[in-house]
Image (tube, grey):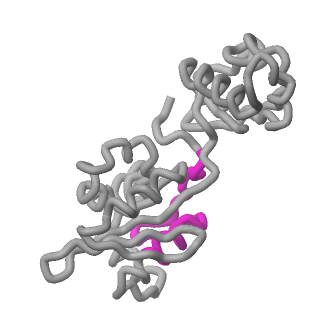
Amino acid sequence: MKIQKVFKIKPEDPRGLEPFKSWEELEPTFEIKTFNGCLLVLAHIEDTQFEKLVGIFQSREEAMGAFLTLAMEHGWEETPESYCIYHAQESEGKLIAGLKTGDGISTYQQTNVEEMVQRMARVHRVVVYSYDVVTFIKDIYPDIDSKVYVIARQIAKKLGRAPELEDLAKVYGASIESLEDKLNFIERLLENPVRTPFGEVELPELSFPLEGC
C-alpha cells in the first residue's frame, strides 16, 4: 500500500503522525518530495505487514481497508499508480468518446458511455488535455473531478496560457485527425518536457496531488 499527504512544513517524524501512530504493528518507509513549495510525504507499507493484524481483523484485506479509511480521515490519499487517457468529440451531432488504457483504445457513443465511466472508475487518474471534454460525462460521473488531470491547466499554471490541442500538435508535427490520434498524442504529452508555441514546460508527476497545499 502506498499513501501520500501534503504538508506545509516537514513533520519531525512521520511515524508520529496518524494513522501510523495508532498502528504500531506496521513498519512504513517514507519518502519526501517537494511539491508546489510544500512537502509531499509518501508512505509505503508492504501488504504482507497487514497479516500481523489477522486475528484483530478477519483478513489482511479487511485490515488494509480499515487502515486506509483511517488514513483518509486524516487527509491521506492512495498514491496514484494507474491512469487512462480520455478525449471526446462531436461527430454528425453525436458524441464520440475514446479511452486509452493499458489494454489499448476503446471508443464509445452516448448509448454505452456508462461502460466507459465504469472503466474510468477503476483507475487513479483520468488524463485529459482540456477540461471541456469532462462536461460530457460530468452528470453521470460527478466524482471525476477528484481524479482528472488536465494537461492544459497544468501548462497554463506555468506559462499563463495554454494552446489549443491542434496548435500543440503542429509544434510536434503530429497528425491528430482521428480520435485515436488525439488519444495517442495526449499520452505523448506526458513525456516531459512539453513543447508549446510559448516555450517548454515541465508537467507535475501524475502521482502528485491534484490540488496544492
Check the image and report above or below for 114 versus 158: below
81 or 39, which lies in front? 81
Screen quadrant of the N terminus: top right
157 or 83, which lies in front? 83
- Does the segment drawn in magenta span residue 165? no
Q: Position of residue 27 (x, y in %)?
A: 86, 25
Q: Position of residue 49 (x, y in %)?
A: 85, 30
- Extreme residue toward the left, this view: 93
Residue at 58% over, 72% down: 103
Is residue 204 something one can see in this rendering? yes
Check the image and report above or below for 182 versus 146: below
Residue at 79% over, 31% down: 30
- Total marks in image: 0
Rendering quarter of residue 152: bottom left
- Does the segment drawn in magenta span residue 195? yes
What range is drawn magenta here?
Answer: 183-207
Q: Position of residue 13 (x, y in %)?
A: 78, 16
Check the image and report above or below for 139 versus 182: above
Left or right placement of residue 73 versus residue 183 in this view: right
Rendering quarter of residue 130: bottom left
Is residue 13 something one can see in this rendering? no
170 or 70, which lies in front? 70
Left or right placement of residue 35 versus residue 139 in this view: right
Residue at 81% over, 19% down: 55
Left or right placement of residue 92 versus residue 12 in this view: left
Left or right placement of residue 41 versus residue 207 in this view: right
Residue at 74% over, 21% down: 57
